[in-house]
Structures are given as structure tokens and as C-alpha cells.
Amino acid sequence: MILYFKLHRTPFYFLSFMKLKLFLKVSFILLIIGIFASSSIPAQLIYSTNNQFSADVSVYVTDNQFSADLLVFKCDSQFSATKNKGLWYFTDNQFSADKVIYFTDNQFSADLIIYFTENQFSAGWKENSKIHLMY
């Protein structure tokens, strides 16, 4: 009787082990896909143009961070920049850019007033009503 019970019980343990093994494989594959998908999210790439009419947003750079709508940190690589958080990477290719901006000399003709900060952690929006300009 004991032998009969063990023989019939063994395949179920084997199946549960196989299910666990399959679950771990699928979980690992999904984890790898998630890592690659999150690292391939495009950064906020900015292209600066000399033509005001071809720009998406006209930007004025201020010397005072308290009068700025957005504090911007210039990133060294496009992978360290993030979407609409004030971390910008300037690209040389207009077609790969998320936003095309024009730097204006007049504060009142600008859509957005920015201040370039030296600290990456202080970058971000000060005026949330203009956040839609960079989406």
C-alpha cells in the first residue's frame, strides 16, 4: 500500500517541480524584456535651431533660477536624460529629437523660460502650467 501511494505520488511532485521551473524561466525572460524595454525608452532629446518658425518651443535662458519655469541640466549622454524632468541632451540631428527649440533673446516672446543648473538633482519644473510644452 505504501509503495502504491509513493508511485502514484511521484509524478505529481515531478509535475509541480516542472511547473516551478517553467515559472522561473518565464519570470526570468519577462525580467530581461522589462530591463531592455525600460532602457530603450527614448530620452528627452533636444535640437536647437536658428529658425524660430521651425521650432516647437521658443526658449529664453534667464540668469535667475527663481524666475524660471524649468530648471534644466545638460546631460552628457542621451541615456542619462529623462522624459520631461528637466534633464536634456542636445542632439545634432533634428529628426531624432523629441523637441526642436529656438533660443530667443526676448523674455516676453518666449514660450518657456529656463535656467541651466549645475546640479542634476535640482533640475525640474517650477511652473507646472507649462509642462505640456515639452511633451
Image (cartoon, rainbow, N blue to C red):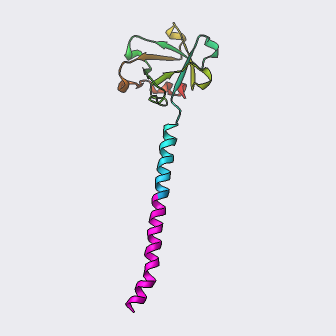
Number of labels in the image equals 0
Provide residue 115's location: percent of width, then percent of height. 42, 16
Q: Residue at x 60, y 17 (%)?
A: 55
Q: Is residue 24 above or below residue 15?
A: above
Provide residue 20's location: percent of width, then percent of height. 44, 65
Q: Is residue 14 above or below residue 41?
A: below
Q: Residue at x 47, y 68 (%)?
A: 18
Quarter of the picture containing the C terminus is top right
Secondary structure character of the magenta stretch overall:
helix
Q: Is residue 76 above or below residue 31?
A: above
Q: Nearer the viewer, residue 46 or 112?
A: 46
Quarter of the picture containing the N terminus is bottom left
Q: Nearer the viewer, residue 34 or 48?
A: 34
Q: Find the residue positioned furthest to the top.
A: 105
Provide residue 103's location: percent of width, then percent of height. 53, 12
Provide residue 14's location: percent of width, then percent of height. 45, 73
Q: Residue at x 50, y 51 (%)?
A: 30
Residue 66 picture quarter: top left
The reply to whether the magenta stretch includes residue 12 is yes
Q: Nearer the viewer, residue 120 or 132?
A: 120
Give the residues drawn in magenta, as a range.
Answer: 1-24
Residue 95 picture quarter: top right
Q: Find the residue positioned furthest to the right.
A: 53
Q: Nearer the viewer, residue 48 or 104?
A: 48
Q: Residue at x 59, y 25 (%)?
A: 96
